Structures are given as C-alpha cells and as structure tokens.
Amino acid sequence: MRYPLNVTVNGLRASADVEPHRSLLSVLREEIGLTGPKEGCDDSECGACMVLLDGEPVNACSYLALQTDGRAVTTVEGVAPADGLHPIQRELLAAGGVQCGFCTPGIVMSAKALLDRNPDCDEDDVRHALAGNLCRCTGYQKIIAAVLRAARQPEHGPADRP
C-alpha cells in the first residue's frame, strides 16, 4: 500500500506516493531525483545521507519518508545561493577538505545546521556537530578549519531561495 507524501524540498513542493517502509533517503534519490545525499552505511553511522529537516540535521537513511509529510527538507542541492557556493562549500574546497567527495554533502549539512544555530562556534562545537560524519580521505583538521573560516563570513546563513 502507498501513501501520499507532500513535502517541501529545497523550497519547492514535492509529492509522491510511497510505501510506509521507505526511507527519506530512498525517496529523495529515487522519486525526487536528488542524489546529493549518499547511502553509505544505511545505519545512521556515517552521515553521508545527512539532510536538514525543519532546520535540524537528520540521517535520511533511517528516517521514514512519511514522517516528513508537511515538513521542510533541505539537501545539499538547496544550500548554495543561485550565484555560487555556500561559504561552507567554498571553504571546504579552499582548505582541501574535500578529496573523494562522498562524505562532503553530509558534512556540509551538519556544518550548516551548526552555523545556523551557533555562528560564533569554536573548534569543540564544530567537532561535536561533525561527530556523526565520517571521512576516510581527508582527516578532519582541514574540514574543521574550513567550517571555522565559513563561520567568520557574514553570508554563512541560510541561502535565500524562492
């Protein structure tokens, strides 16, 4: 049996009929066509699937899609302003905090949630916010430094989207 799902994704309304067992990650990727959130562990351990649900970070792999009905989801595709990259994305690139890129969307989302709630964060805050995001390539120093640099930029807040 399928149930209607009506959700706002990256500022746009999206609808789908989904089975009750479907994860938010599978619906985002397979029904809505957003491939930024990745399936890494499928067990809420790696953070590659991180999205914001009403502004709070959640692992989309273990969140039921139907639980998002009537709510707002932001994926990495919805973070950057129309004219470029979000400061977190820019700083990750500049710092070399991106290598294979698989973990990057989840890291961007966790960092964005932190900066939205605490723009005056320190290194401990960043480490805590990124604790659910695993990276096998870069180590974490460059990632943490990039988030701290992004926090110092005035435009790090939510992107203005229609």
Image: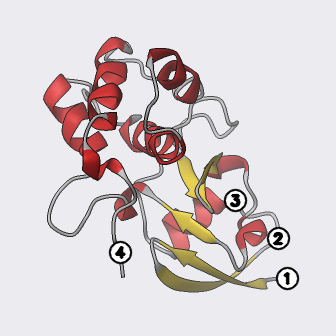
Q: Residue at coordinates 48% horizontally, 48% vertically from top-left?
A: 116
Give the mark, 1 or 4, whose residue is nearer the N terminus: 1
* Pointers 1 and 4 in contact (C-beta within 8 Å): no
Q: Position of residue 113 (x, y in %)?
A: 52, 45
Mark 1 or 4: the one toward you: 4
Q: Is residue 20 left or right of residue 18?
A: right
Give the mark, 1 or 3, whose residue is nearer the N terminus: 1
Q: Is residue 93 above or below residue 53?
A: above
Q: Position of residue 126 (x, y in %)?
A: 48, 24
Give the mark, 4 or 3, whose residue is nearer the N terminus: 3
Q: Position of residue 23 (x, y in %)?
A: 70, 59
Residue hosting label 4: 161
Q: Residue at coordinates 46% horizontally, 59% vertically from top-left?
A: 75
Q: Amino acid at mark 2?
A: Pro
* Pointers 4 and 3 in contact (C-beta within 8 Å): no
Q: Residue at coordinates 45% horizontally, 21% vertically from top-left?
A: 122
Q: Amino acid at mark 1?
A: Met
Residue hosting label 3: 23
Q: Nearer the viewer, residue 160 or 154?
A: 154
Q: CA distance from mark 3 to mark 2?
A: 8 Å
Q: CA distance from mark 4 to mark 2?
A: 30 Å
